């Protein structure tokens, strides 16, 4: 796990590997502003809450809801969300379902914070399995945690519609799309996270962050 706002130790090595093995990713790396990189700038709770808010909506819509939520409850922490009344959450633009998920998450952090702090030495799969025990957290949300909180290098979020659609377009992938995308991803070795991060940059010049 990285310190906050620091570059992953594997980042430059990953860029070199990808550039040597995939000309499309190489061109993307060359075309974007490379002063940015994947990093960790949120607490574990914030990363999961941000990902829950972002489920099945656009980045712009999620950002709007998040900003309203922070304004309504005075920030984004387990205790603030745990103690917020329902109208504060509803007025933020959250669906009833997401309010339930966020409330469960906040309650877990308040009552059993150790649940989230033993991940450092766990495998990606074991972390996904443990996070998915919580209602409202599925594989995509758990993968966002692995990418943005733990900065794990080899995550391929095939449930991320934006990533998949963009990859299908730039690689001209035919049906069956996911199976063929898996074949393409073999060129990325153990640095799939980094390839995904750069493909996200095509979708939105703003750096993706949870």
Image (tube, rainbow, N blue to C red):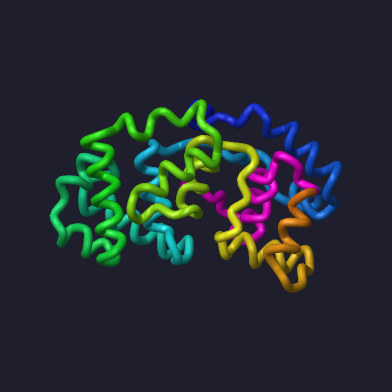
**Closer to us: 204 or 188:** 188
Q: Is residue 93 visible?
A: no
Vertical position of residue 133 compared to residue 92: above or below: above
Vertical position of residue 194 compared to residue 182: above or below: above
Q: Residue 205 vs residue 114: left or right?
A: right
**Closer to us: 105 or 124:** 124
Q: Residue 31 vs residue 8: left or right?
A: right
Residue appearing at x 65%, y 41% in the figure: 154
Residue at the farthest bottom position: 175
Which image quarter: residue 75?
A: top left
Question: Does the segment drawn in magenta span residue 98?
Answer: no
Q: Is residue 35 visible?
A: yes
**Closer to us: 10 or 118:** 118
Residue appearing at x 21%, y 54% in the figure: 72
Q: Position of residue 36 (x, y in %)?
A: 62, 41
Residue appearing at x 78%, y 63% in the figure: 171
Q: Position of residue 90 (x, y in %)?
A: 22, 64
Q: Which residues are magenta?
A: 187-210
Q: Position of residue 195 (x, y in %)?
A: 70, 48
**Closer to us: 153 or 39:** 153
Which image quarter: residue 130?
A: top left
């Amino acid at each position: 796990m990285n310190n906050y706002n620091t570059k992953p130790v594997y980042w430059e090595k990953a860029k070199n590997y990808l550039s040597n093995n995939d000309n499309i990713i190489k061109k993307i790396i060359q075309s974007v502003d490379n002063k940015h990189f994947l990093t960790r700038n949120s607490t574990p709770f914030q990363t999961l809450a941000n990902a829950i808010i972002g489920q099945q909506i656009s980045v712009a819509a999620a950002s709007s809801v998040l900003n309203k939520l922070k304004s309504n409850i005075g920030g984004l922490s387990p205790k603030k969300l745990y103690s917020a009344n329902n109208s504060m959450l509803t007025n933020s633009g959250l669906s009833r379902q997401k309010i339930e998920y966020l409330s469960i998450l906040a309650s877990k952090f308040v009552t059993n914070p150790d649940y989230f702090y033993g991940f450092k030495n766990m495998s990606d799969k074991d972390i996904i399995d443990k996070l998915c025990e919580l209602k409202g957290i599925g594989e995509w949300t758990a993968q966002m945690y692995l990418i943005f909180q733990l900065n794990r290098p080899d995550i391929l979020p095939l449930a991320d519609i934006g990533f998949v659609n963009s990859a299908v377009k730039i690689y001209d992938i035919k049906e069956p799309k996911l199976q063929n995308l898996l074949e393409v991803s073999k060129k990325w070795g153990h640095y799939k996270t980094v390839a995904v991060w750069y493909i996200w940059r095509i979708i939105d010049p703003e750096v993706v962050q949870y």
